[in-house]
Image (spheres, rainbow, N blue to C red):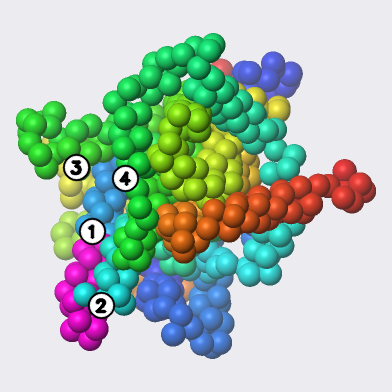
Amino acid sequence: MSRIAEYDLPPELTNAGLGSDNNFVLDNQLEVMTPENIAFQHSIAGPFQRVLAFGFDIMITQVGYWTIVAIFAFAVIPLAVTLFGANNFLAEVLAGLSIAMVLVGSFVITWFYGAYMETYYNGRTWGKMVSRQRVLSVDGSAINGTQAALRNFFRAIDLFPVVSPSVFLGATGLTEVYPLPTALVGIVVMCANRSHRRIGDLIAGTMVVVEPVRGSKAMLKFDDPRVARLAELIPIDFVVDHKLASALSSYVERRHFLGEQRVAEIASRLAPTLRHRFGMPSSTNGDLLLCALYQRTFLEESDEGGTVSQSTDEVSITEPLISETSAAPAESNNQEGTDESV
Amino acid sequence: MKASEVIEQRRPAWDRLEAMCETISKKSSRSMNQVNDFAMLYRDACADLALAESYQLPAGTIEYLHSLVAKAHNQLYRSRTVDWQGLFEQIVFETPRQIFREPCVHIATLLFWGLFFCSAFLAYNQSYWPTFAEDVVGAEQLESVNSMYSSFEGRNWSENAFMMGFYIFNNAWIGLSCFVSMLPILPGLVTLSYNAISIGTIFGYMFRPDQGLAGEHFRTFVTAHGPFELTAIVLSAGAGLRIGLSWLITNGMRRRDSLIVNARNSLPIVLCAVALFVMAAFIEGFISPAPENIIPWWFKGIVAIGSSALLLVYFVILGYPWTRNEI
C-alpha cells in the first residue's frame, strides 16, 4: 500500500478556515467550548419561537403599565382627594405627579424592562422564562448589563418599519395613536445569519438559545421476540465501532417516526454489508437485523451471560456460525485495503 | 459495560442535576451544600459527555447530555449584577475622559451648534434672508409658537409635575431614538440636523426685538434648562454616530467585531445623555415655567450658569487626560 506524500496546498483549499471561529452552527446547534475544555451544544432559538416570547413580554409590560395607571387613577388620586379635598394644593400636585409617574413609567418600561430582567434574571425576561429561552453571549457565557441594555435599546431598529394601522383598518381617530411595528428588519436580519441574531444581538454580541432538555435518557426496548432471536445469531466477536454505534442508535431512535417502506429503504443501505459479514442469508429482514445489532450493542446486559464462563458457553453454542463467518470480515478488510490503495 | 448499564447507573445523578437546575435558579434555595453538590454533579455530567463515545452511548442519550450540560452551565455561570465600585469609577473617571476625546461627539457638537447658530443668525437678522424663518419652519408653526408664549403666564404646580413627567418621557425617548437611528447614519444625521435647524430658527425668530411679550416669555422659559437639554441631544447623537461609523471605519477589525466593541463603548455616553435629559426635565418642569414674581429671571440665569459650570467640570476638568503616562 503506497502512501501519497503530503504536499502543501494553498490555504483556500484546506480545512484551515473552518474551525477558526471557536464556535460554529450546524442544524441550529451551536457548539460551545468552555474554558474548562468541555464541548457541548446549545440549540439556537428561531425567529418564530422568539416572536412568541416577545409577544408574551408585550402582554406583561402592557399589564404592568395599566396596573400603574390603575393604581394612580383609582387609588392614589381618589385617596388624595378624600384626604385633602378636591381643590387643595397638595391634591392637585399629587394628581399632576401621578400623570407624570405614568408617563415616566411608560418610558422606563419600554426602554429598560428587557435590560433589567436580562441582567438580574440571568438572561431571561418573563416571556423567555415561559418559552424556556435564555440570552447568552456568543461564546456561551452569561451576558452582562451592558449587553442586556444594548440589545434592548436596538430593538427599536429591529421593529422597523413602523406603519400606521390605518393602512389596514382605514383612517379612524384611534389608529393614529398606536403605530404598528412590523419588525420586518429584525426578521430579515435574523433569517440572514445562522445563529438567528437580530440587529440588537449583533451589536451586543449575544444570541438566544432554547433550554428544554432534548433527547432521552431512557433506553429503547424491543417487544418483538424476533429481535432477541436474531441478536443471538450475531457473532460474539463482532466489534461495533463508534461510527456504526451512532448510526445504529440514530436509526433505531427515528424508525418509529417513519413509514414501513422508508424504514426498509434506509435499512437496505447498511443491512447487506452486515448480512455479508455475519454470513446470514440475503433474505434476512434488514430492519430486524439493525434492531438486533442495536440490542447487542447497547442493551444486552451481562446478567444474560452472567459470568465469564457462561459467556464462553454461549460462544460454543454459536461456534458453527463464527467459523462460517470468520472469513467474511477478513475478506472485507482486504477489500477496504484495496479501496484505500486505489 | 453496555450502554444501558452505564445509563442505569448514571441516571439518578442526571435526574438530580436536572432537578437542581430548576431549584438553584432561585436565590433563596442556594445554600453552600447545594452549590457544592451542584458543581460536583455538573462535573460528573461533563465527564459523562466527554466519555460518551467510549461508553458507546446511543445518539439520543448524547443529545440529552448535551442539553443537560448546557442547562447546568447556564446556571453555573450567571449574569453578573451591578458592581457599584466599578460603576462609580466608570461615571466619575472613565466616561468624562471618553467623551472628551471622542471624535464622534466633536463632530456631533460641531454639526449641531454650527447649524443651530447659522439658522438662529439667519432667522434673527432680517437683512440677509428676510423670510428665512418662514421658509424653514413655516409661518403657521411660527404663529403657534408665538401665540403659545405670548399667552404663557406660568403654570400651577399640578401642571408642573405633569409636564416634568412629560419632558422625561418625550425628550429622553427622542434622545434614545436619535442614538438608535444613527446606526444607518443617514436617518440619525437628518434627525440631528432637523432638530438643530428648527430649534435654532425658533430661537433666532423669538429673540428678534419686535417679538414683544412672547419673546420675553420665551427667553425666560428656555434659559434655565437649555444647557442640559441641548448637551444631551448632542451626546446621544455623538454616541449613535460612534456606532454608525464603527461598521464603516473598522480600524482593521471585522465589521461585526468593530460594531460590538464600539457599541459597548458608546453605551455610557448615551446613558449620560439620558441622565442629562432627566435633570433637564426637572428644571424644565419646575423652574423654567415659574413666573417672574416667584422665580426671577436672574435666578434662572444662575441655574443656567451653574449647570453650564457643572457640565464644564464634568466634561473638561474630569475629562482632560491629566496623567500623561496613560497614553
Nearer-N-terminus badge (3/2): 2
Residue at mark 4 to residue at mark 3: CA–CA distance: 28 Å
Q: In terms of sequence position, does the residue under pointer 1 or pointer 3 come before the other? A: 1
Label annotation for residue A88: 2
**Residue B236 picture quarter:** top right
Q: Mark 3 and mark 2, same subunit?
A: yes
* Part of the protein shown in magenta: A65-86
Q: What chain letter is assigned to the residue under label 2?
A: A
Is disc 1 placed on a helix, strand or loop?
A: helix
Q: Which residue is mark 4?
A: B151
Magenta stretch contains residue A70: yes
Distance of mark 1 from mark 2, alpha carbons?
A: 32 Å
Most foreground residue, B59 or B189? B189
Q: Quadrant of the C terminus of chain B?
A: top right
Kindly report the distance in space between the C-alpha atoms of the residues bearing marks 4 and 1: 38 Å
Indicate which label's residue lies in the foreground, 2 or 4.
Answer: 4
- The residue that disc 1 covers is A62
Q: Compared to B299, does B140 lie above or below?
A: above
> What amino acid type is highlighted by mark number 3?
Val
Labels 4, 3: front one: 4
- Horizontal and vertical percent position of residue A258: 17, 42
The lab-note entry on whether marks 1 and 3 share a chain reads: yes
Q: Are marks 4 and 3 in contact (CB under 8 Å)?
A: no
Tag 2 or tag 1, which sits nearer the N-term? Answer: 1
Q: Residues within 10 Å of mark 2 (few under 14, many from 20)?
A: few
* Comparing labels 1 and 2, the label whose residue is closer to the camera: 2
Residue denoted by label 3: A177
The Cα–Cα distance between marks 3 and 2, rounded to whole angstroms, is: 33 Å
